[in-house]
Image (cartoon, rainbow, N blue to C red):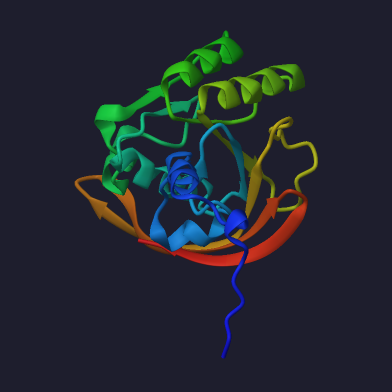
Amino acid sequence: MVQSLSPISSRPSVGRASQLVQDVLPVDPGIVDIFPQRGLRKGSVLRLRGSYGSGLYSFAVQSLVAASQHGAWVALFNVDDLGYGFLLRSGVDLERTLIIHDDQHPSRTLATLLESFAIVVTPPNLSLAQMARLSARARERSSIIISVERVARSGSAGVPRWEGGVDLTVHLRSASWAMELESGITSVTRGEVVVTVEHHGVGRTVVASAS
């Protein structure tokens, strides 16, 4: 059987392929199929949406743990549902992780974090203009914004969402997580999630696992 080959000119060069790898931070192998670039693309905005009980924050941590273990600096801004104990048990490198709260000047603080941190996790409690500016700042600094958005089971009407410069949206439809409690600290040991992924106007459903 003769295999059809693409013209050499259409194939990425070794240098280009290397650059593509450098532009993407790794994710857990169990959820890699969720991401079009098979990782977190630098300079992008990722929206994570899920209802109570969907494992929204567990999935957010699972999305960044591999990057953290490979040296990426992570900031969690105004995220009340995550603490250092959970992050430690999930495998996040705490030496490169910061949890910070600022209700007075959130946009200014986020802009500062994007200057120094590879990944910034935050709820979208900002104005449209502020979100647009921060999306632009993330692109300029090759940082990643992960917007965690809790929606009601009855629907998403009125729920804050990141607007402007969104590259990928992941809706958690259902999830089952195996939890472990040790020394008063709860962590996720493994899980399976069903998500709908929206990228450039195209949606698809993915079943993924994490451990």
Task: Please give left or right for residue 164 compared with residue 83 in the image.
Answer: right
Q: Residue at x 19, y 46 (%)?
A: 183
Front residue of 205/17: it is 17
Front residue of 143/159: it is 143
Q: Quadrant of residue 86?
A: top left
Measuring from the top left, give residue 2's x and y in whole percent. 58, 86
Q: Residue furthest right?
A: 157
Front residue of 204/76: it is 204
Q: Residue at x 69, y 17 (%)?
A: 130
Q: Residue furthest left?
A: 183
208 w.r.t. 99: above or below: below
Task: Please give left or right for residue 18 compared with residue 56 in the image.
Answer: left
Whether residue 126 can be seen here: no
Measuring from the top left, give residue 153's x and y in whole percent. 69, 53
Q: Quadrant of the C terminus?
A: bottom left
5 w.r.t. 199: above or below: below
Whether residue 62 can be seen here: yes
Q: Residue at x 69, y 50 (%)?
A: 199
Measuring from the top left, give residue 165's x and y in whole percent. 70, 32
Q: Residue at x 31, y 33 (%)?
A: 84
Task: Please give left or right for residue 51 compared with residue 180 in the image.
Answer: right
Q: Residue furthest front?
A: 8
Q: Quadrant of the N terminus?
A: bottom right
